[in-house]
Image (spheres, rainbow, N blue to C red):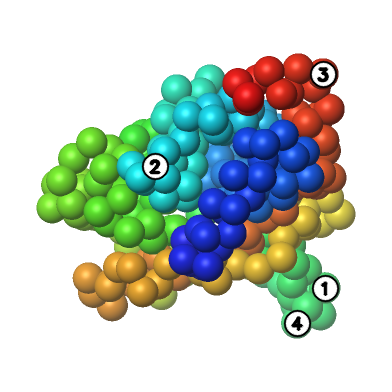
Amino acid sequence: MHDKVSKDESDENLIKTAKSGDKIALASLLMRHQTFIYNVALKMLNDIECARDVTQEVLIKVLTNLSKFDRGKAKFTTWIYRITKNHIINFKKSPWEQASVSFENFFDYMENVPDKSLSIEEESELFDSIEEAKITCTSGMLMCLDREQRMIYIIGDLFRIEQKVAADLFNTSPQNFRKRLSRVRRDLQQWMHNKCGLVNKSNPCRCKSKTKALIARGEVDPVNKKWLSGHKELVQERTSHSMVSFESAKDELYDKIFQSHPYKLLRNEHEIINSILGHEEFTQLMNL
């Protein structure tokens, strides 16, 4: 889990060493949290290059403000959450957001993607592409939420940040945060229930039947996979399950679809850290 006490204690030791000017400790600290930041940004923006930009900019903010971090006010992970959330909320629109996607036009588009049946051999051959199609489609569903709704869902349900911490990130009470999360779930689940075959078997839309057409349209690339390359586990394996109990089995069904998405590593994951630490003014940026 991202928020283990042992990790938090280790963070504190790295922070102390980094503040003394130790470049290796600083690199270790930034590397430890880089992948989490990247995955939140990727789910929020649905664009790899935008997510990389966000990750680099958030890490620079962490770097430039590290000397001001006060362990007495918040855990380091909570501090990271706040910087990440605030930066993404104010980040430029990704290409998906510029397209102003709504649930209505998204599902209209998917309904117009031709269904193509697969033989057993084709289904086996296209196994990864079918999974890629599923993740591509469900990631698109998240983009139908506005930015604040999306962030609430990602923090509250995908990564299951402790509700007291999540509420504080949105400057509200835990009770109000739960209400806001419930409204987001309702909107997302209502559309999925009426359109998506993953949650309602009576719906005709099936990931495997759309895969060939999505490949033909360039939405899915069997060679250069957007989602199934550069990952080490699932989002579900990185969530704090003990922090929040499910409100219902129905919520669990929907959450598992999104939590089954890959928890992705950046390509050339050391590149961003090295570029930051290679800056000739990195010690001045830390205000040491």
Give the residue drawn at x 86%, y 54%: 223
Give the residue drawn at x 43%, y 58%: 158
Which is closer to the viewer, label 1 or label 3?
A: 3
Estimate the x, y position of residue 23 in percent, counting from the top left: 77, 38
Q: How many marks?
A: 4
Residues marked 3 and 4 touching at CB (< 8 Å): no
- What is the CA distance from the residue labelled 4 to the residue labelled 1? 9 Å
Residue situated in front as seen by the camera: 18 or 233: 18
Neighbour tally class for label 4: few under 14, some 14-19, many 20 plus, Cα within 10 Å: few
**Secondary-structure class at tag 2:** helix
Q: Amino acid at mark 2?
A: Met
Give the residue drawn at x 38%, y 57%: 161
Q: Quadrant of residue 249?
A: bottom left
Which is closer to the viewer, label 3 or label 2?
A: 3
Label whose residue precedes the other's in the sequence (1 or 3): 1
Label whose residue precedes the other's in the sequence (4 or 1): 4
Return the mark for residue 280: 3
Estimate the x, y position of residue 170 in percent, counting from the top left: 27, 38
Which is closer to the viewer, label 3 or label 4?
A: 3
- Residue 217 appears anywhere in the view: no
- What is the CA distance from the residue labelled 3 to the residue labelled 2? 35 Å
**Secondary-structure class at tag 1:** helix
Residues marked 2 and 1 touching at CB (< 8 Å): no
Return the mark for residue 125: 1
**Secondary-structure class at tag 4:** helix
- What is the CA distance from the residue labelled 3 to the residue labelled 4? 57 Å
Label whose residue precedes the other's in the sequence (3 or 2): 2
Residue situated in front as seen by the camera: 21 or 185: 21
Label whose residue precedes the other's in the sequence (3 or 4): 4
Which quadrant: the C terminus?
top right
**Secondary-structure class at tag 3:** loop
